[in-house]
Image: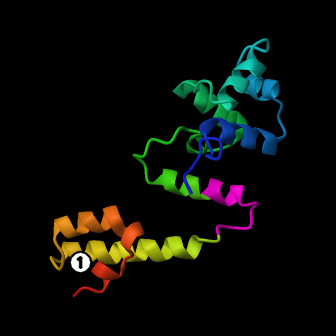
Amino acid sequence: MPCRKEDAMTQGKRIRAIRKIRGFTRKELGMKAGMNPKSAASRISRYEEDKCSPRKDTLMKIAEALNVSPMAIAPYTGRDFREILEILFWLEEAQNADGIEELSEIVTMMNVWETVKDKRNKGIISDKEYREWKLQCFCIGTENLVRRE
């Protein structure tokens, strides 16, 4: 099923979710982050509705006001492995705190990836085969390269 923007845990949705967990109004959060009381609620509203993204210094102040790591509300860049954990944490939240049902699949897939990468490092498979596995592993399964000796 394709991911729709309204389903994604955007930066704004994460700010809103944490603000609600902390029990702050938009105005209270904005003021705790050092914003002008007259514009605090509207600024936080714009961030939560993903109409704009806070500058880095503002993001740091919002994170401090919410008592969270800045990474918890930062935009995803795809350049930091810790973002994967943040995504998994929010995925768990979206599933009503029952945990990620697919967690064992994720762990298995990570282990398979490590196995395939190890085979590449040992020269059992080529760089091209390794790259193709990464591009196709969710289409064709993992048996092809994992069991290959």
Residue bearing the label numbered 1: 119
Looking at the rendering, in which quadrant would you find the N terminus? bottom right
Residue at 42% x, 67% y: name it.
Answer: 138
Query: Closest to the observer: 67 or 17?
Result: 17
Verify whether residue 93 appears in magenta.
Answer: yes
- Establish if 135 lies above or below 77: below
Number of marks in the image?
A: 1
Looking at the rendering, in which quadrant would you find the C terminus? bottom left
Q: Which residues are magenta?
A: 89-100
Residue at 37% x, 77% y: name it.
Answer: 142
The x and y percentages for residue 101 are 64, 71
- Establish if 86 lies above or below 131: above
Q: Residues within 10 Å of mark 1 (few under 14, many from 20)?
A: some
The x and y percentages for residue 37 are 79, 15
Q: Would residue 60 be found to the left or right of residue 32 on screen?
A: left
Residue at 79% x, 28% y: name it.
Answer: 26
- Establish if 85 lies above or below 108: above
Image colouring: rainbow
In which quarter of the view is residue 18 placed?
top right
Q: Secondary structure at mark 1?
A: helix
The x and y percentages for residue 25 are 83, 30
In which quarter of the view is residue 44 placed?
top right
Circle 1: residue type:
Lys
Q: Would residue 7 be found to the left or right of residue 123 on screen?
A: right
Residue at 32% x, 78% y: name it.
Answer: 115
